[in-house]
């Protein structure tokens, strides 16, 4: 994968592809439960596309209606029809609320887990997600009721209208901070892999395990409890082990994307399967380096997506500033908003796009 678009990375480790069979999980869930999960996932993914397409269309309509030159060539009734149609589209804002409520519940659990574990970083990052999701829910609900009010009574609810600007500012600024932190973490891990793994002349097994344990934030307590058979653990030790694993998993996902974290876990398994000798065989070195290339590709993908997300949020903030200046072209803010949502749509498509992995 080329890194020219980023400009801050060196190239990932280059090795030929090697494929492994992927284990099937089709029998892990009951049919009814699996169907419910699939249905909700399909709904969530569909709206991640359709919701943004609707917003791009809506803002484009408003940009057209506010285009003075274009509207002088058309009748006043045409402009009113466009605005009225855009108001009807606003009613669709309520469709995404159930998804956001589900995300909010998950985020609350992360905050509580972070508080219980006394993990300040987890609480802060989950708190930012909570802020963004909450603001988005309030914005969607108020947009729906304002649109309904316009269609039913001809007027907006002033309180809801006044809330629109601060909610948008909160979501955009918090999103920029959150994505900047994620980019910094991805860059740091990418560079650590280059410096400690890819540039090494020989891979020492113990040094590799130490690197992975530090990256995966595996504590001595977690290592010690994990080596004890489950039937020999006391109930208190089992609870402690479960707690440490949950805390560890959360910490890993804050450091790396889920796909990268999965490959890091696979690396740990490979190194743990054979502890004899400190020097890794050529065959194992090839497998390990291929996995690290996978991880670097996932990190690159994450950085690019987050950078595009920051750009979209900056476009939104620029549009909000233009809204406050009456001297500006009326259509300009809506053009910027449509562009910002189009960028977010492109990010979703990019994130869902399957980049062929080196190890499957």
Image (cartoon, helix red, strand yellow):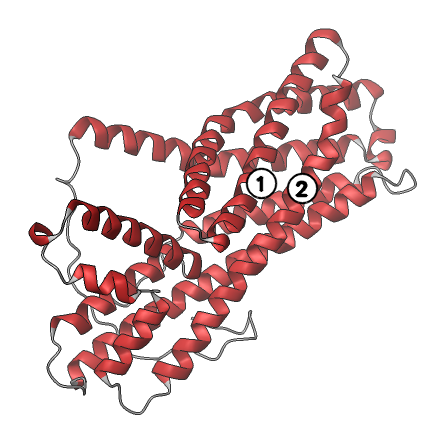
Image location of residue 341, percent across then percent down? 61, 43
Dot 2: what SS? Answer: helix
Near mark 1 (Cα within 10 A), the count class, few <14, some 14-19 or many ≥20, is many
Residue lying at the far right in this picture: please name it.
327
Q: Residue at x 27, y 79 (%)?
A: 208
The one nearer the camera, 350 or 166, is: 166
Find disc 2 in the rendering and name its residue. 170
**Residue toward you, 65 or 288:** 288
Picture disc at residue 132: 1
15 over 255 or under it: above or below: below
Q: In the image, which disc is placed on residue 165?
A: none
- Residue at the far top in the pictured view: 153
| Left-right relation of 259 to 18 | right
Residue 253 location, quadrant? bottom left
Q: Position of residue 303 (x, y in %)?
A: 51, 62
Q: Quadrant of the N terminus?
A: bottom left
| Quadrant housing residue 90 | top right
- The secondary element bearing badge 1 is classed as helix
Q: Residues within 10 Å of mark 2 (few under 14, many from 20)?
A: some
Report, in whole angstroms, how far the alpha carbon at label 1 lies from the one at label 2: 7 Å
- Residue at image location 67% in from the left, 18% down from the top: 147
Residue 131 located left or right of residue 325: left
- Residue at 62% from the left image edge and 34% from the top image edge: 57
**Farthest residue toward the bottom?**
201
Q: Could you tell which of marks 1 and 2 lies nearer the N-terminus?
A: 1
């Amino acid at each position: 994968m080329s890194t020219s678009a980023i400009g801050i990375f060196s190239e990932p480790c280059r090795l030929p592809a090697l494929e492994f069979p992927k284990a099937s999980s089709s029998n892990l869930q009951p049919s009814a439960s699996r169907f419910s999960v699939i249905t909700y996932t399909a709904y969530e993914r569909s709206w991640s596309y359709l919701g943004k397409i609707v917003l791009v269309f809506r803002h484009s309509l408003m940009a057209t209606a506010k285009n003075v030159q274009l509207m002088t060539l058309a009748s006043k009734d045409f402009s009113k029809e466009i605005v009225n149609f855009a108001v009807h589209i606003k009613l669709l804002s309520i469709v995404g609320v159930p998804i956001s409520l589900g995300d909010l519940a998950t985020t609350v659990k992360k905050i509580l887990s972070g508080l219980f574990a006394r993990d300040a970083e987890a609480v802060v990052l989950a708190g930012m997600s909570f802020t963004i999701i909450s603001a988005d829910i309030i914005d969607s609900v108020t947009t729906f009721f304002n649109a309904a009010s316009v269609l039913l009574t001809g007027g907006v609810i002033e309180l809801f209208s006044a809330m629109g600007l601060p909610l948008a500012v909160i979501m955009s600024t918090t999103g920029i901070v959150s994505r900047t932190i994620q980019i910094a973490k991805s860059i740091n891990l990418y560079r650590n892999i280059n410096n400690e793994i890819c540039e090494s002349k020989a891979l020492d097994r113990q040094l590799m395990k130490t690197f992975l344990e530090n990256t995966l934030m595996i504590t001595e307590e977690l290592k010690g409890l994990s080596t004890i058979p489950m039937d020999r653990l006391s109930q208190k030790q089992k609870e402690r082990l479960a707690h440490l694993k949950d805390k560890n998993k959360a910490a890993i996902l804050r450091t790396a994307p889920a796909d990268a974290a999965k490959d890091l876990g696979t690396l740990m398994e490979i190194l743990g399967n054979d502890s004899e000798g400190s020097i890794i065989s050529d065959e194992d070195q090839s497998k390990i380096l291929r996995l690290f290339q996978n991880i670097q590709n996932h990190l690159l993908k994450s950085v690019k997506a987050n950078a595009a997300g920051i750009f979209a949020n900056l476009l939104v903030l620029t549009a909000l500033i233009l809204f406050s200046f009456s001297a500006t072209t009326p259509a300009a803010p809506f053009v910027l908003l449509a562009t910002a949502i189009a960028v977010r749509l492109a990010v979703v498509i990019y994130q869902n796009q399957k980049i062929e992995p080196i190890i499957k």
